[in-house]
Image (cartoon, rainbow, N blue to C red):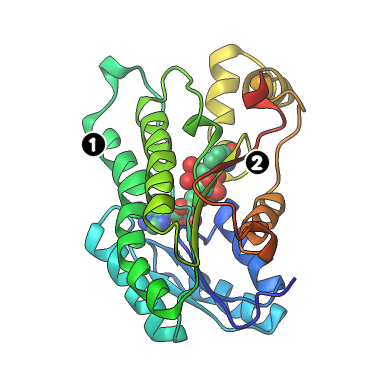
Amino acid sequence: MTLAGKTAVITGSNSGIGLGIAEELARLGSDIVLNSFTDNPEDHALAERIAEEHKVRAVYVAADMSNGDACRSLVAKAREAMGSLDILVNNAGIQFVAGIDEFPVEKWNAIIAINLSSAFHTTAAALPLMRAQGWGRIVNIASAHGLTASPFKSAYVAAKHGLVGLTKVTALETAEEPITANAICPGYVLTPLVEAQIPDTMKKYGMDRETVIREVLLERQPSKQFATTAQIGGCVAFLCSAAAEQITGTTLSVDGGWTAL
Ligand code: NAD
């Protein structure tokens, strides 16, 4: 398949899953708009590297996904830079782990803003552009935690369940149009977000790294393997393919069997 001539905006894509998605869509010929909240030379260098490697156009646009206006202006700037916006991947996300009664309010607000509200704002800004163009694909990166819960992750689980709900509403509101909206629900993928949880867990349980990975992180992932960022990118590409034209409003689990348990 080819995505030549399309433009994809991927929020939170200077690292981890977002970067993996950008690489895969670029490999298939899509022009790419990378994003995060930082504005460092290495962010722009990442866009240059992707453009060169895959012979596509790629730019980096700094925008803080915790700010609704910034989310909307990311979409406008992407359109301005590339001339169209065909694929919107809402991927930016953060995590914080604590019991509900001890959960810092500012962490709750940040997680809801970045992991959920940002997708509302970018979708609201992108839909008129997709409608005018007559084609659009919205892919929300939710989580196995958009379908099931774990203790101590109240904000994350609430935001991801909310994102799955937003995906369904977006699909219904665009059902008769050539636009689809779906959510991908990864289990554990070894990215900086997950890597950051390993040292504390090692300390907490007095375990070595391998034991933490197998018995804590992958405890509920029956395959006992991490999903990869390239696999998530491949799933986004599939949802943008002709085969997926009638797939809308659904969730695609990439979790090694977690939600089959
Ligand atoms: P990551 O920390 O590597 O990447 C998160 C990205 O979001 C980074 O590019 C970061 O710069 C960006 N970001 C954070 N705050 C932002 C803000 N305010 N504005 C703009 N960008 C911001 O983590 P990841 O594991 O690649 O996570 C990506 C997405 O995948 C998240 O939504 C996460 O919840 C989801 N996810 C991850 C896993 C996993 O196991 N890694 C599993 C399920 C779902």
Q: What secondary structure is marked by label 2?
A: loop
Specify whether residue 194 is in view.
Answer: yes
Q: Which mark is residue 70?
A: none
Q: Which mark is residue 190?
A: 2
User: Is ligand 1 less than 8 Å from the beta carbon at label 2?
Assistant: yes
Residue bearing the label numbered 1: 106
Q: Which residue is located at x 57 percent, y 72 percent? A: 46
Q: Position of residue 12 (x, y in %)?
A: 46, 57
In the image: residue 102, left or right of residue 250 = left
Q: What secondary structure is marked by label 1?
A: helix
Q: Which residue is located at x 71 percent, y 36 percent? A: 226
Compared with 152, 7 (above or below) is below
Q: Which residue is located at x 57 percent, y 28 percent? A: 199
Quadrant (top left, top right, bottom left, bottom right) of the N terminus:
bottom right
Residue 261 picture quarter: top right
Q: Which residue is located at x 66 percent, y 34 percent? A: 255
In the image: residue 148, left or right of residue 244 = left
